[in-house]
Image (spheres, helix red, strand yellow):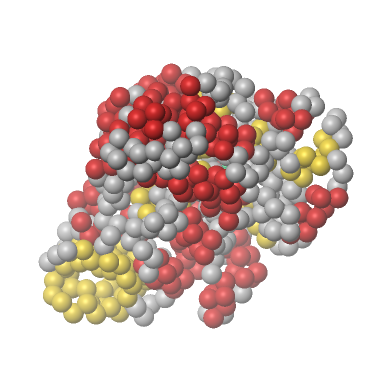
Amino acid sequence: MQENGNHEGPGEEAVFFAEEHTLTDEGRPAPTGTHSRVLSGYAKEYRDRFLKHYDELKWLYCELYQNRMDGFEALCSMMYRYYQNRKKDLKALDEKRLEEPDWYKGNRLVGMMLYVDAFAGNLEGVRKKLDYIEECGVNYVHLMPFLDSPEADNDGGYAVSDFRKVKPALGTMEQLSRLADDCRKRGISLCMDFVMNHTSQEHEWAKRARAGEKEYQERYYFYDDYGIPAEFEKTVPQVFPTTAPGNFTWLADMGKFVMTSFYPYQWDLNYWNLAVFHDMMDNALNLINQGIDVVRIDAVPYIWKQLGTNCRNLPQVHSIVRMMRMICEIVCPGVLLLGEVVMAPDKVAPYFGTVERPECHMLYNVTTMASTWSSVAARDARLLKRQMDILSRLPREYVFLNYLRCHDDIGWGLDYPWLATLGMGEVSHKKYLNDFFTGCVPGSFARGELYNSDPASGDARLCGTTASLCGVEKARVEQDEAALERAIWLDLMLHAYMFTQSGIPVIYSGDEIGQENDYSYHEDPVKREDSRYLHRGKFRWDLETKRADKDSLQARLFDEIGRLEKIRGSHPVFESDADVWTADTWEDSVLCVIRAKGEEKLVALFNFSEWDKTAWINEDDGEYEDLISGRTMEAKGVNIPGYGVYWLLKK
Ligand code: GLC
């Protein structure tokens, strides 16, 4: 287990599971084997939470780890220690959130994701920019990976070499805590990545494994020859078919293969080994106690590997996530789990768990994101209408993170069987999307680059910033005023659409000022093979200052996005538990989404084409006010300009 002295040795708490059946202080039967002395030593609030989950946690743990009660005991001791070490104000926030468990639902949160170095150099820099973040209307900040990772071979920080240390160039653990403190005072929630599928090959465990320590080799998947890897390769798809083909890497110095689902330098952790689970929970809780509110569980579907399967979304993954949820509910109940599940919708929703056994609090709305860009390229919103219909049938408790762009590529995971009914084939549509967004078809305004283009299968994904994909870059370079105007409209329409979806909208840092692609990564030997760096450029503070000129592109986007956020935040109809449905517009490029909550009814219209259209809707119930322009209108046969948007609120 953890070498760095965090793991409890046998001591006082070793008697924790003495074989006796006792009563709790309140006279309720304590779970079998629980020692009353230890239980009564627990703070009351902790004990209640612990007892609530004890049976299920033990059950799942024992099922996964062959009834290893010594391991379970160590886990419980560790949990209590983190509870004890949790700062007073974090405990107070836990209590507050327990009283208001829906605190993250509704329409209050607006998120932003950013790279610490690209945004402000380091953690102290981010702390100094909190005023700007607040000015953006943002109260949820996702800090991209900030833990120590090698200079090269780091996958943008997703190859962690030390979970207990901040990357020195970005700061220290103390500075992370300080940033979290300042955020908390301002009511800003902080999200961090927890990369639990793998470590960097530079991580201490990996180094010790490489040096021949068997105990550490057991933390990864090592094989002496290609026999078993070959069996795995028969059923396991590839994540990066072009940039990192295969799921195993040969280590000549060791004479062994190691499993590497992502990059060769990211070694998959072996969760069959309880030491891995234990120490990773230790690492997670240690980070959480710095003041983290939201844990983004990176690449979670991949964490359990089993021969003969595709090693994705296996039942054991759900057991682990459920255990993480319970551990958090016991130790730090104010903390939320955000699952990164970039999969088809039927694979995503199970990560919410069930009402009795919830797993993640929030998940990415990845299919909607991809369908949105497909609708832009096709000038056809029918797929999006279908996607909205599917989402609106899901339970209201589900909270999605809505986004237009993130740090990763756009993968074209669309509903192809349904698109086929419109005459769009999977291969041809994907090709069209990639051609469109790389500016290769007539009429395209987008400037993107392919990602993991696989000539063998013809498959590829896509990179680029929102502004560049919307046409801002091309119009600026070509000095085409009219095209620039259209690009701004499209960009704003897409943001308005994101804000119309139930859940938490997350802006990608730089999008609020229309930041374009950054091509400098082509010159960087560490980055040039990975086109995702195209949209991971440095935040352009030089352009941000242009906001002072109200006619500038930056001011127009920034101010208008801010205005949309304010409108969203001030009308209950945007809350997550509103009723949502769509209406036919009899115009393929115009999407109509209707939301209703209490007295409020909103008819939202989005034109996904550059041409003026009419939405042939007939909401025959009187006058509406367009919340964006202030105009009074009827929600009947509405003329809508190219890339226009209306938020019509029933008067
Ligand atoms: C997640 C991250 C991605 C990274 C991968 C491997 O998918 O979003 O950026 O490459 O995990 O850690």
Q: Is residue 76 left or right of residue 629?
A: right
Residue 628 shows up from this direction: yes
Please name the residue shown 73% across and 62% down the image. Answer: 457
Q: Nearer the viewer, residue 438 or 178?
A: 178
Please name the residue shown 71% across and 38% down the image. Answer: 220
Quadrant of the snapshot with the N terminus: top right
Q: Quadrant of residue 203?
A: top right
Q: Is residue 170 above or below residue 264?
A: above
Residue 554 shows up from this direction: no
Q: Position of residue 257 (x, y in %)?
A: 81, 40
Q: Nearer the viewer, residue 347 or 607?
A: 347
Q: Nearer the viewer, residue 70 or 511?
A: 70
Q: Nearer the viewer, residue 359 or 365?
A: 359
Q: Position of residue 487 (x, y in %)?
A: 42, 55
Q: Is residue 643 above or below residue 65?
A: below
Quadrant of the snapshot with the C terminus: bottom left
Please name the residue shown 37% across and 21% down the image. Answer: 178
Please name the residue shown 67% across and 25% down the image. Answer: 204
Q: Position of residue 497 (x, y in %)?
A: 35, 59
Q: Is residue 315 left or right of residue 260?
A: left
> Where ligand 1 lies, by image quadrant?
top right
Q: Is residue 384 above or below residue 126?
A: below
